[in-house]
Structure formats: structure tokens, C-alpha cells
Image (cartoon, rainbow, N blue to C red):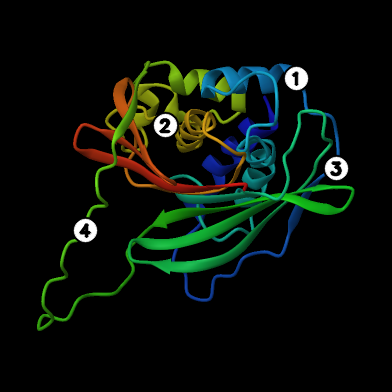
Amino acid sequence: MTGLSLSLARGAVTSPFKRAGRPGAALPADRAVIPPGRIAPGPLAAYSRVCGFAESGPLPLTYPHVMGFPAAMRLMTARGFPLPVLGLVHTWIEITAHRALHPTDELELTVYADGLTPHRRGTEVTMVTEARLAGALVWESRSGYLSRHATGTTTPPSAPPASPTASPPELPAAAEWRLPADLGRRYGAASGDRNPIHLHPVTARLFGFPRHIAHGMWTIARCLAEAGTGPGRIRSVRADFKAPVPLPSTVTYAAEGAAFQVRGGSRLHLTGSLTREG
């Protein structure tokens, strides 16, 4: 069993004993540090293939996050972490590369939790991953994970109903992707993230999903692979995950300028924006 699989198993055991939204809950100050080491070419090639990146050239912008995810899971499944890892929903991610990275770079990774934030649907934790070369910060990501629970807040009867959040304008379609039923298993094998909600309809139903769903990190990686054909290196990206992408399905990648979306019919799955050098 891999380290990430062990963390998922530990999370299954510890989650029932954790109560999200507990008053006074605090995050442990622990930091996980992965010492510098060579990036294994086989897993990187498999990851690049399943996400649509070229198998040569710079390191995919999302790959340090994948390298640090097992450490993030160890922190989130530790006894002192206040939120149950089962049911956590990845809600957003920001990634910044301060320089181009290459598969030969030996990155030192640091992962830590950076704050609990009240959310209208529960409590959100921000997880940070940082990559350094010779002590210099060269890459960083911040991710939001939502633990859904009752918040204890109600709208006063006299208050007018809140207006619905306006949907962002629909961007021009740029590509259509047909996502196979085994995409979650293929991405899980390449990334190590074998969360059962992504693997099979039966295991997904155990966690309240009618069908298994694509990994959010696959979705953003596939967007960056598609956008990577444009001029200039992508320096940073922000993406918000709006709705799960069921498997199998057909989705549309849409883009205009710095903005991009993933849509399935009339449903918006992801919105994002990126910046380039120059």
C-alpha cells in the first residue's frame, strides 16, 4: 500500500471521530518537508500523457502539487487536524511558478495548513505547497478544501431573499473532450490519488455521488495543457471548481483571453484565469 493509500485508510478511520465546525478548533502548526530528490521519469510521463501535456520540455505547472499531495494528506489525516478528511471538497486552487521548472530540477517541498475560514456551507481549510531550489522559492500553490456541515446561521424572516449569484458569461468553445469511464482510475494510477469517489460508480455512491467523478486536479491540468499552446509561459493560474464532472461524459473547454471554463451542456464545472510571461 502506498503512502497516499495509507493516508486515505487512516482518514477513513479517524474521520468519524472529528466534528467539523467545533468552536475554538485550531490547525496544528506541523509542516511536512520532502527533501530534494530526482523526479521519477516514469510517473511523470504517465501523468503527462493522461493530462495532455507534452512528454518533453518544462515540468507541468501542476506537477509539484501532485508531488506534495501525499504529504498534504498525511497532515489532513493526522489526529490533530480538526476536519474529517472524508467528504472534503476541493473548491479552488491558485498556482504560481516564479520561474520555469524542469524535470531535472531537484525540488524541496514544504506543505502546511494555513488557516480555517468560515464558509456558508461549513468550514474551509487552505493547504499550501511550496517548492524550493537551493533554498529559493520557485513555485507555490494554495488550495481550498471545504468540510460541509451545518453552520448554525439563519436568515432573519424579515430579510429579503438573496438574489441568485450571476453566472459568468459563457466563453467561446475551444475544444470538446470525451472523458472515458476509466479516466479516474488512469489519473489515480499516474498521480497516486486513488480516492474512491473517482474510481468506480459503486465506490462513489458510498460517498453520496450517483456516479464516479473526474479529479479536479485532472480537470485543471487538462485546461493548462490545452492553454499551453498559446504564446508565453503560463506563470500563474487560479481555478474555482463549481460542480463535479461525472464519468463518462463529454465536456467543452472554452477560453477567451486569460479566462477559461469547462462546461458540460448548460452546467458550469470550472472557471479560471491565467497569466503569462511577457
Q: Earlier in the sequence, mark 3 or mark 2?
A: 3
Amino acid type, label 4: Ala
Where is residue 25? Give x, y as percent: 54, 70
Q: Which residue is mark 3?
A: 35
Where is residue 260? Give x, y as percent: 39, 42
Q: Which residue is mark 2?
A: 197
Q: Earlier in the sequence, mark 4 or mark 2?
A: 4
Amino acid type, label 2: Ile
- Specify whether residue 220 is in view: yes
Amino acid type, label 3: Pro
Closer to the camera, 13 or 108? 108
Q: How busy is the neighbourhood of tag 2: few (under 14 within 10 Å), some, or many (20 plus)?
A: many
CA separation in Å, label 1 and label 4: 44 Å
Q: Earlier in the sequence, mark 1 or mark 4?
A: 1
Q: How busy is the neighbourhood of tag 4: few (under 14 within 10 Å), some, or many (20 plus)?
A: few
Q: Is residue 22 above or below residue 136?
A: below
Element on which disc 2 rests: helix
Which mark lies nearer to you, 3 or 2?
A: 3
Q: Earlier in the sequence, mark 1 or mark 3?
A: 3
Q: Which residue is mark 4?
A: 166
Q: Which residue is mark 1?
A: 41
Where is residue 123? Give x, y as percent: 44, 63
Q: Quadrant of residue 183?
A: top left
Residue at 11% across / 80% down in the picture? 157
CA separation in Å, label 1 and label 3: 18 Å
Q: Is residue 115 above or below residue 76?
A: below
Which mark lies nearer to you, 2 or 1?
A: 1
Element on which disc 4 rests: loop
CA separation in Å, label 2 and label 1: 27 Å
Q: Is residue 149 left or right of residue 127?
A: left
